[in-house]
Image (spheres, rainbow, N blue to C red):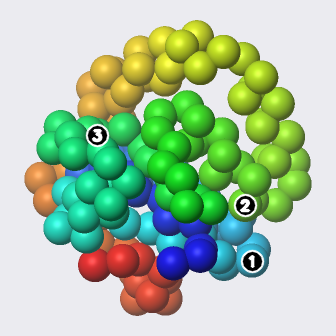
Amino acid sequence: MSEPIVLFDGVCNFCSDAVKFVIDRNTAKNVRFCQLQTATGKALLAEHGRVDPGLTSMALIADGRLYVKSSAALRVCRYLRAPWPLMGVFLLVPTPLRNLVYDWFGRNRYRWFGKKAVCWIPEADIRQRFLE
């Protein structure tokens, strides 16, 4: 698959809203999505050498590479309409420092935004952009 794929936590309210944010701003409609909890999501991670059943952070597969955490989030911005690609400047910040902030937010997201009992099911008009 040559299109970028965003892997996300399907039970996280914030993560589902972030996917909707990307969908609304990805005017080229070239970004695909897959929930980490699905067999396809786990298989995609495994194809890229990541076998971590506890992974709940965002991941991006683009140009044959797997990006996780802050690197994934910032690289997704490249596929959005302006001004979001400018967020790529934060890739200049050392990864460990970026991921400190990312991990802190990740530890608190369920408490701040809530969690669904089951994975989010996208509406029919965008479902074709999701891998099952």
Indicate the quadrant where residue 118 lies. Answer: bottom left
Indicate the quadrant where residue 51 lies. Answer: top left
Residue 26 point in image, percent of width and height: 70, 68
Q: Where is mark 2, residue-wise?
A: 79
Give the residue type at disc 2.
Answer: Tyr
Asked whether the viewer can see residue 90, the reply is yes
Question: Which residue is found at the position 54% from the left and 13% from the top?
Answer: 96
Q: Is residue 33 above or below residue 126?
A: above
Question: Which residue is found at the position 41% from the left and 15% from the top?
Answer: 104
- CA separation in Å, label 1 and label 2: 8 Å
Q: What secondary structure is marked by label 1? A: loop
Q: Where is mark 1, residue-wise?
A: 28
Count of labels in the image: 3
Q: Residues within 10 Å of mark 1 (few under 14, many from 20)?
A: few
Label 1 or label 2, whichever comes before in sequence order: 1
Q: Is residue 7 above or below residue 106?
A: below
Q: Is residue 81 left or right of residue 13?
A: right
Label 2 or label 3, whichever comes before in sequence order: 3
Label 3 or label 1, whichever comes before in sequence order: 1
Give residue 4's mark: none
Give residue 56's mark: 3
